[in-house]
Amino acid sequence: MTRALRQIAAVSAFGLRTIGRRRGAAAAAVFGIAGVVAVFVGVLSIREGFVRTMSVSAAPDSAIVLRSGANTEMMSGLQREETRWIADAPGVARSERGSLASAELFVVINLPKRDTGTDANVPLRGVERAAFDVRNDFQIVAGRMFEWGRNEVIVGAAAATEFAHLDLGGSFEVGASDWNVVGVFSEGGGVADSEIWADAGVLQPAFNRGSTFQAVFARLDSPEAFTAFKDALTTDPRLNVKVMRQEDYYDEQSRATSGLITGLGSVIAGLMGIGAVFGALNTMYSAVASRSREIATLRALGFQAGPVVASVLLESLVLALAGGLIGGGVAYAAFDGYRAATLNFESFSQVAFAFDVTPRLLVQGTLYATLIGLVGGLLPAIRAARMPVAAALHES
């Protein structure tokens, strides 16, 4: 075993020292793999950013109540009396201002995107006073809070960046009414940062919704209070509701979009990976051909086939690893923190988010590069080991 390891080390060191003589082919393989990894990590960073934006909105002690059978707020509907029964349910946290349960209205309006000018579905949410206590990390970051009873709105920080007419002090028209932007808020980078908020009492008549709402967001006494809260509502004969933890709700909301991104990213990376494998094959076949006499000489001196195979594979893996590291670095520099907006297929509204190049993605990209190098180096390594010694020694 020790002798074999010494032979592997000797042959590998010799092969790596000769990469400079083949720098053109080696560079092509490295940058080909780097391109694959950069695309792979970049596309999947879209999924990571989208999922993070959805998940950061939920707290363990928060719940959402919808009409039974509804999967989204758009499909739900609750009467004012029903929202009051929900707010009085056991397990709901309370403050000096009352129950921490906010009945809310959710509609979608068309606004153009700043970069393309194309219309996008932007969420407009009607809220009650409790909404600001129910949410995590809510704060006004510019301007002021809207005044209750007036056609004023506050906009999420991400929405203000992505969509036109949402500048502080600006206005936009919905139906027969003009809505004035008086403040910009943030909820710690969550999905609410993509929304516009207004007084639910003003929004209802503007959209002919009467006294109806679509969901109730509630803060509970503790995460453990969820079971009692859910049981009380689902067994109440006056109600026909669906009760979910907010983290489960947002997980379901992100599943379709993240699945689509993952599928497309995997297909693109797979097709590019096949091309990179052929590039690695070409590079390593060239390396074996240029070193045929050296390899044959080593075999004649008593080196076994195994160390030769290992040395060629190691060279291929070194080139692939270099490509993986370069590709990961490029992806991080180009994509991490890049802001965009995409359609949430569950609510048919836009969600603004930032691409997130996570350490896990960088590790996955490096492993993918290593796999490409392993596959691309395997056949040339076998060819090197099977090369006839006498014929190779007589090559000019």
Image (tube, rainbow, N blue to C red):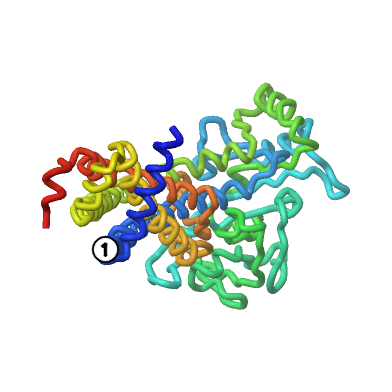
* Residue 291 picture location, percent across and down: 23, 54
Q: Could you tell me residue 84's position as x and y percent?
A: 73, 39
Residue 47 position, x and y percent, is 46, 50
Q: The N terminus appears in which quarter of the rendering? A: top left
Quadrant for residue 118, please give it.
bottom left
Residue at the location (33% across, 48% down)?
373
Is the residue marked by circle 1 packed among few (<14), some (14-19), or many (20+) residues within 10 Å?
few
Residue 191 image point, x, y percent: 58, 53
- Left or right of 107? Residue 146 is right
| Side of 53 where 226 appears, left or right | right
Residue at 47% over, 41% down? 255
In this figure, which residue is indicated by the disc labeled 1?
22
Q: Nearer the viewer, residue 348 or 39?
A: 39
Displayed quadrant of residue 68: top right
Q: Amino acid at mark 1?
A: Arg
Residue 204 can be seen in this image: no
